[in-house]
Image (tube, rainbow, N blue to C red):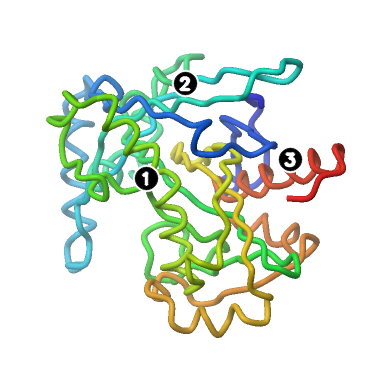
Amino acid sequence: MAKVAEVVMMPEGSRYQLLLSCPSGLSLSQLSVDFSKSHDRIQHPDHDLEDSIAQAWEQRTQGNSSLFNGQKFRFGSLCLDGDGGTNEVPHVCLRLGLTDYRTFVGTNLSSQWDKFLVTSQDDCVRCRHTSSPLGNAAVVETSDHKIIVLRRSDNVGEFPGHYVFPGGHPEPMSVGIDSHQLENDGEVLNKKVSQEMFDSITREVVEETGIPASSLSTPLFIGISRRELNVRPAMFFFIKCSHHSDDIPRLYSSAEDGFESTQLHTVSLEELKTMASRMPGCHHGGFALYQLMLQRLESTNETP
Protein backbone atom coordinates (compact mmCIF):
# COMPACT_ATOMS: atom_id res chain seq x y z
CA MET A 1 0.00 0.00 0.00
CA ALA A 2 1.50 3.37 -0.90
CA LYS A 3 0.69 6.99 -1.35
CA VAL A 4 1.79 8.37 -4.69
CA ALA A 5 2.56 12.07 -4.89
CA GLU A 6 3.53 12.23 -8.57
CA VAL A 7 1.02 13.67 -11.00
CA VAL A 8 0.81 11.72 -14.26
CA MET A 9 1.18 14.16 -17.17
CA MET A 10 -1.16 13.92 -20.18
CA PRO A 11 -3.99 16.05 -21.65
CA GLU A 12 -5.41 18.24 -18.88
CA GLY A 13 -8.71 16.44 -18.37
CA SER A 14 -6.97 13.05 -18.17
CA ARG A 15 -4.28 13.95 -15.64
CA TYR A 16 -4.57 12.26 -12.29
CA GLN A 17 -2.91 11.73 -8.96
CA LEU A 18 -3.10 8.49 -7.01
CA LEU A 19 -3.85 9.50 -3.44
CA LEU A 20 -3.82 5.88 -2.30
CA SER A 21 -2.99 2.56 -3.93
CA CYS A 22 -4.06 -0.76 -2.38
CA PRO A 23 -2.94 -3.35 -4.97
CA SER A 24 -3.77 -6.26 -2.67
CA GLY A 25 -7.37 -5.03 -2.37
CA LEU A 26 -8.97 -4.18 0.95
CA SER A 27 -12.15 -5.66 2.39
CA LEU A 28 -14.73 -3.86 4.52
CA SER A 29 -12.94 -4.95 7.72
CA GLN A 30 -9.83 -3.09 6.51
CA LEU A 31 -11.55 0.24 5.86
CA SER A 32 -13.02 2.55 8.46
CA VAL A 33 -14.48 6.04 8.37
CA ASP A 34 -14.18 9.08 10.61
CA PHE A 35 -17.30 11.06 9.69
CA SER A 36 -17.12 14.48 11.33
CA LYS A 37 -18.00 18.14 10.83
CA SER A 38 -14.28 18.83 11.26
CA HIS A 39 -13.80 17.42 7.73
CA ASP A 40 -16.38 19.73 6.15
CA ARG A 41 -15.43 22.40 3.65
CA ILE A 42 -14.21 25.73 5.04
CA GLN A 43 -15.64 28.85 3.42
CA HIS A 44 -13.25 30.93 1.35
CA PRO A 45 -12.28 34.30 2.88
CA ASP A 46 -12.89 36.05 -0.45
CA HIS A 47 -16.57 36.97 -0.17
CA ASP A 48 -16.97 37.55 -3.92
CA LEU A 49 -15.56 34.11 -4.67
CA GLU A 50 -17.82 32.56 -2.03
CA ASP A 51 -20.85 34.36 -3.51
CA SER A 52 -20.00 32.90 -6.92
CA ILE A 53 -21.11 29.46 -5.67
CA ALA A 54 -24.76 30.52 -5.56
CA GLN A 55 -24.41 32.26 -8.93
CA ALA A 56 -22.93 29.15 -10.55
CA TRP A 57 -25.74 27.00 -9.18
CA GLU A 58 -28.41 29.42 -10.43
CA GLN A 59 -26.90 29.42 -13.90
CA ARG A 60 -26.63 25.61 -13.96
CA THR A 61 -30.22 25.04 -12.82
CA GLN A 62 -31.87 27.53 -15.19
CA GLY A 63 -33.87 25.47 -17.62
CA ASN A 64 -32.74 22.20 -16.03
CA SER A 65 -35.32 21.11 -13.49
CA SER A 66 -33.72 17.66 -13.14
CA LEU A 67 -30.78 18.96 -11.08
CA PHE A 68 -31.13 18.20 -7.38
CA ASN A 69 -29.02 19.60 -4.57
CA GLY A 70 -28.38 16.30 -2.81
CA GLN A 71 -26.03 15.67 0.09
CA LYS A 72 -22.66 14.00 -0.60
CA PHE A 73 -19.78 12.75 1.50
CA ARG A 74 -16.84 15.15 1.36
CA PHE A 75 -13.35 13.69 1.11
CA GLY A 76 -11.16 15.40 3.70
CA SER A 77 -8.10 13.16 3.99
CA LEU A 78 -7.04 9.63 4.88
CA CYS A 79 -4.68 7.79 7.15
CA LEU A 80 -3.26 4.31 6.73
CA ASP A 81 -1.64 1.66 8.90
CA GLY A 82 0.27 -1.43 7.85
CA ASP A 83 2.44 -1.40 4.76
CA GLY A 84 4.85 -3.56 2.85
CA GLY A 85 7.54 -5.28 4.86
CA THR A 86 5.39 -6.05 7.90
CA ASN A 87 2.92 -8.73 8.85
CA GLU A 88 0.40 -6.12 9.93
CA VAL A 89 -2.93 -6.24 8.10
CA PRO A 90 -3.30 -3.00 6.06
CA HIS A 91 -6.01 -0.66 7.24
CA VAL A 92 -7.26 2.66 5.85
CA CYS A 93 -9.34 5.30 7.59
CA LEU A 94 -11.19 7.81 5.42
CA ARG A 95 -11.88 11.19 7.01
CA LEU A 96 -15.18 12.35 5.58
CA GLY A 97 -17.36 15.38 6.03
CA LEU A 98 -20.62 16.48 4.42
CA THR A 99 -21.13 18.60 1.33
CA ASP A 100 -23.75 18.98 -1.41
CA TYR A 101 -24.09 19.08 -5.17
CA ARG A 102 -24.69 22.83 -5.23
CA THR A 103 -21.33 23.51 -3.58
CA PHE A 104 -19.67 20.99 -5.89
CA VAL A 105 -20.98 22.86 -8.93
CA GLY A 106 -19.85 26.19 -7.46
CA THR A 107 -16.33 25.10 -6.45
CA ASN A 108 -14.88 22.01 -8.14
CA LEU A 109 -16.90 22.40 -11.36
CA SER A 110 -16.59 26.19 -11.47
CA SER A 111 -14.47 27.84 -14.16
CA GLN A 112 -12.74 29.47 -11.19
CA TRP A 113 -12.05 26.16 -9.41
CA ASP A 114 -8.32 26.80 -9.06
CA LYS A 115 -9.00 30.04 -7.13
CA PHE A 116 -10.53 27.93 -4.35
CA LEU A 117 -7.22 26.10 -3.84
CA VAL A 118 -4.66 27.07 -1.20
CA THR A 119 -0.93 26.88 -1.91
CA SER A 120 0.21 24.16 0.46
CA GLN A 121 2.08 20.84 0.50
CA ASP A 122 -0.62 19.59 2.85
CA ASP A 123 -3.34 18.19 0.61
CA CYS A 124 -6.04 18.68 3.24
CA VAL A 125 -5.16 22.38 3.47
CA ARG A 126 -4.82 22.78 -0.29
CA CYS A 127 -8.41 21.66 -0.91
CA ARG A 128 -10.01 23.04 2.25
CA HIS A 129 -12.29 25.42 0.29
CA THR A 130 -13.52 22.92 -2.31
CA SER A 131 -16.57 20.68 -2.04
CA SER A 132 -14.60 17.56 -3.12
CA PRO A 133 -17.46 15.02 -2.97
CA LEU A 134 -16.12 11.47 -2.88
CA GLY A 135 -17.12 9.56 -5.99
CA ASN A 136 -16.81 5.84 -6.59
CA ALA A 137 -16.31 3.49 -9.54
CA ALA A 138 -15.60 -0.17 -10.15
CA VAL A 139 -13.43 -2.13 -12.53
CA VAL A 140 -15.86 -4.98 -13.26
CA GLU A 141 -14.32 -8.09 -14.81
CA THR A 142 -16.53 -10.65 -16.57
CA SER A 143 -16.05 -14.43 -16.40
CA ASP A 144 -14.05 -14.32 -19.67
CA HIS A 145 -11.81 -11.54 -18.31
CA LYS A 146 -13.29 -8.60 -20.17
CA ILE A 147 -13.70 -5.20 -18.48
CA ILE A 148 -16.96 -3.23 -18.54
CA VAL A 149 -16.68 0.35 -19.77
CA LEU A 150 -19.50 2.85 -20.34
CA ARG A 151 -19.65 5.79 -22.72
CA ARG A 152 -21.22 8.71 -20.92
CA SER A 153 -24.34 10.39 -22.23
CA ASP A 154 -24.06 13.85 -23.80
CA ASN A 155 -26.59 15.08 -21.19
CA VAL A 156 -24.52 14.46 -18.05
CA GLY A 157 -22.85 17.28 -16.14
CA GLU A 158 -19.27 15.98 -16.17
CA PHE A 159 -17.27 14.79 -19.17
CA PRO A 160 -20.14 13.98 -21.56
CA GLY A 161 -19.21 11.42 -24.21
CA HIS A 162 -16.16 10.11 -22.34
CA TYR A 163 -15.43 6.52 -21.36
CA VAL A 164 -15.86 5.65 -17.68
CA PHE A 165 -16.11 2.68 -15.36
CA PRO A 166 -19.54 2.14 -13.74
CA GLY A 167 -19.93 4.24 -10.62
CA GLY A 168 -21.38 7.28 -8.90
CA HIS A 169 -21.30 8.29 -5.24
CA PRO A 170 -21.83 6.78 -1.81
CA GLU A 171 -24.98 8.48 -0.53
CA PRO A 172 -25.40 9.99 2.96
CA MET A 173 -29.17 9.57 2.75
CA SER A 174 -28.74 5.82 2.28
CA VAL A 175 -27.61 5.64 5.89
CA GLY A 176 -30.03 8.31 7.13
CA ILE A 177 -27.61 11.26 7.15
CA ASP A 178 -28.79 14.72 6.15
CA SER A 179 -26.76 16.70 8.69
CA HIS A 180 -24.18 16.25 11.44
CA GLN A 181 -26.84 15.98 14.14
CA LEU A 182 -26.41 12.21 14.37
CA GLU A 183 -22.75 12.39 15.39
CA ASN A 184 -23.59 11.60 19.03
CA ASP A 185 -23.71 7.96 17.90
CA GLY A 186 -20.28 8.38 16.34
CA GLU A 187 -19.00 4.81 16.42
CA VAL A 188 -22.25 3.31 15.12
CA LEU A 189 -22.56 5.99 12.46
CA ASN A 190 -18.97 5.50 11.27
CA LYS A 191 -19.62 1.79 10.81
CA LYS A 192 -22.74 2.53 8.77
CA VAL A 193 -20.82 4.96 6.57
CA SER A 194 -18.02 2.41 6.08
CA GLN A 195 -20.62 -0.15 5.01
CA GLU A 196 -22.12 2.38 2.59
CA MET A 197 -18.74 2.75 0.86
CA PHE A 198 -19.04 -0.91 -0.22
CA ASP A 199 -22.82 -1.15 -0.58
CA SER A 200 -22.96 1.92 -2.80
CA ILE A 201 -20.54 0.65 -5.44
CA THR A 202 -22.49 -2.59 -5.85
CA ARG A 203 -25.69 -0.52 -6.09
CA GLU A 204 -24.16 1.76 -8.74
CA VAL A 205 -22.93 -1.16 -10.84
CA VAL A 206 -26.36 -2.80 -10.72
CA GLU A 207 -28.16 0.43 -11.63
CA GLU A 208 -25.80 1.41 -14.47
CA THR A 209 -25.20 -2.00 -16.08
CA GLY A 210 -28.29 -4.05 -15.22
CA ILE A 211 -26.15 -6.88 -13.82
CA PRO A 212 -27.92 -8.38 -10.77
CA ALA A 213 -26.14 -8.05 -7.45
CA SER A 214 -26.19 -11.84 -7.06
CA SER A 215 -23.83 -12.07 -10.06
CA LEU A 216 -21.25 -9.72 -8.53
CA SER A 217 -18.48 -10.57 -6.09
CA THR A 218 -17.86 -8.69 -2.88
CA PRO A 219 -16.04 -5.46 -3.85
CA LEU A 220 -12.35 -5.02 -3.08
CA PHE A 221 -11.17 -1.46 -2.46
CA ILE A 222 -8.05 -0.77 -4.59
CA GLY A 223 -7.40 2.92 -3.95
CA ILE A 224 -8.29 6.56 -4.50
CA SER A 225 -7.58 8.56 -7.64
CA ARG A 226 -8.04 12.28 -8.08
CA ARG A 227 -8.46 14.16 -11.33
CA GLU A 228 -6.04 17.06 -11.46
CA LEU A 229 -8.58 19.18 -13.34
CA ASN A 230 -10.84 20.55 -10.56
CA VAL A 231 -9.39 18.14 -7.97
CA ARG A 232 -12.17 15.54 -8.21
CA PRO A 233 -11.56 12.48 -5.94
CA ALA A 234 -12.98 8.98 -6.46
CA MET A 235 -12.49 5.66 -4.71
CA PHE A 236 -12.07 2.57 -6.89
CA PHE A 237 -13.05 -1.05 -6.41
CA PHE A 238 -12.48 -4.34 -8.18
CA ILE A 239 -15.51 -6.60 -8.73
CA LYS A 240 -15.77 -9.94 -10.51
CA CYS A 241 -18.92 -10.73 -12.49
CA SER A 242 -20.06 -14.32 -13.02
CA HIS A 243 -21.59 -13.52 -16.43
CA HIS A 244 -19.80 -13.96 -19.74
CA SER A 245 -19.23 -10.73 -21.66
CA ASP A 246 -21.76 -11.88 -24.30
CA ASP A 247 -24.51 -11.67 -21.64
CA ILE A 248 -23.81 -8.09 -20.57
CA PRO A 249 -25.44 -6.12 -23.44
CA ARG A 250 -28.75 -7.88 -22.81
CA LEU A 251 -28.61 -6.99 -19.11
CA TYR A 252 -27.57 -3.42 -19.90
CA SER A 253 -30.67 -2.92 -22.07
CA SER A 254 -32.80 -2.95 -18.90
CA ALA A 255 -30.43 -0.98 -16.63
CA GLU A 256 -32.22 1.40 -14.25
CA ASP A 257 -29.76 4.25 -14.87
CA GLY A 258 -28.99 3.39 -18.49
CA PHE A 259 -29.88 6.96 -19.48
CA GLU A 260 -26.58 8.15 -17.95
CA SER A 261 -24.65 6.35 -20.69
CA THR A 262 -25.18 5.68 -24.38
CA GLN A 263 -23.07 2.55 -24.86
CA LEU A 264 -21.62 -0.32 -22.88
CA HIS A 265 -18.39 -1.99 -23.99
CA THR A 266 -16.75 -5.18 -22.73
CA VAL A 267 -13.09 -4.87 -23.63
CA SER A 268 -9.78 -6.66 -23.22
CA LEU A 269 -6.93 -5.19 -21.20
CA GLU A 270 -5.17 -4.12 -24.39
CA GLU A 271 -8.31 -2.42 -25.69
CA LEU A 272 -8.76 -0.69 -22.34
CA LYS A 273 -5.26 0.75 -22.57
CA THR A 274 -6.20 2.56 -25.77
CA MET A 275 -9.45 3.87 -24.25
CA ALA A 276 -7.92 5.13 -21.00
CA SER A 277 -6.68 8.39 -22.52
CA ARG A 278 -10.32 9.21 -23.34
CA MET A 279 -11.37 8.82 -19.71
CA PRO A 280 -11.68 11.65 -17.16
CA GLY A 281 -8.54 11.86 -15.04
CA CYS A 282 -10.03 10.19 -11.97
CA HIS A 283 -11.11 7.17 -14.08
CA HIS A 284 -7.78 7.08 -15.91
CA GLY A 285 -6.25 6.89 -12.45
CA GLY A 286 -8.69 4.07 -11.64
CA PHE A 287 -7.26 2.13 -14.58
CA ALA A 288 -3.77 2.74 -13.19
CA LEU A 289 -4.91 1.31 -9.83
CA TYR A 290 -6.25 -1.77 -11.61
CA GLN A 291 -2.91 -2.21 -13.42
CA LEU A 292 -1.06 -2.02 -10.09
CA MET A 293 -3.37 -4.72 -8.76
CA LEU A 294 -2.63 -6.92 -11.78
CA GLN A 295 1.12 -6.37 -11.38
CA ARG A 296 0.96 -7.47 -7.77
CA LEU A 297 -1.05 -10.58 -8.70
CA GLU A 298 1.48 -11.44 -11.39
CA SER A 299 4.40 -11.04 -9.00
CA THR A 300 2.76 -13.31 -6.42
CA ASN A 301 1.27 -15.78 -8.94
CA GLU A 302 -2.22 -15.14 -7.60
CA THR A 303 -5.50 -14.77 -9.46
CA PRO A 304 -7.95 -11.91 -8.77
> Could you tell whether 266 is left or right of 299 in the image?
left
Closer mark to the observer between disc 2 and disc 3: 3
Q: Is residue 5 visible?
A: no
- What amino acid is labelled 3 in the image? Leu
Q: Quadrant of the N terminus?
A: top right
Gap in angstroms between the C-alphas marked 2 and 1: 25 Å
Q: Which residue is mark 1?
A: 196
> The residue tagged with tag 3: helix, strand or loop?
helix
Q: Which residue is mark 2?
A: 123
Q: Earlier in the sequence, mark 2 or mark 1?
A: 2
Residue 218: where, in percent of width, then height? 55, 52
Toward which corner of the image does residue 62 lie, by quadrant? bottom left
- What amino acid is labelled 2 in the image? Asp
Q: Residue at x 75, y 61 (%)?
A: 274
Q: Which residue is mark 3?
A: 292
- What amino acid is labelled 1 in the image? Glu
Mark 3 and mark 1 in contact? Answer it, CB < 8 Å: no
Q: Residue at x 67, y 72 (%)?
A: 266
Toward which corner of the image does residue 182 lie, by quadrant? top left
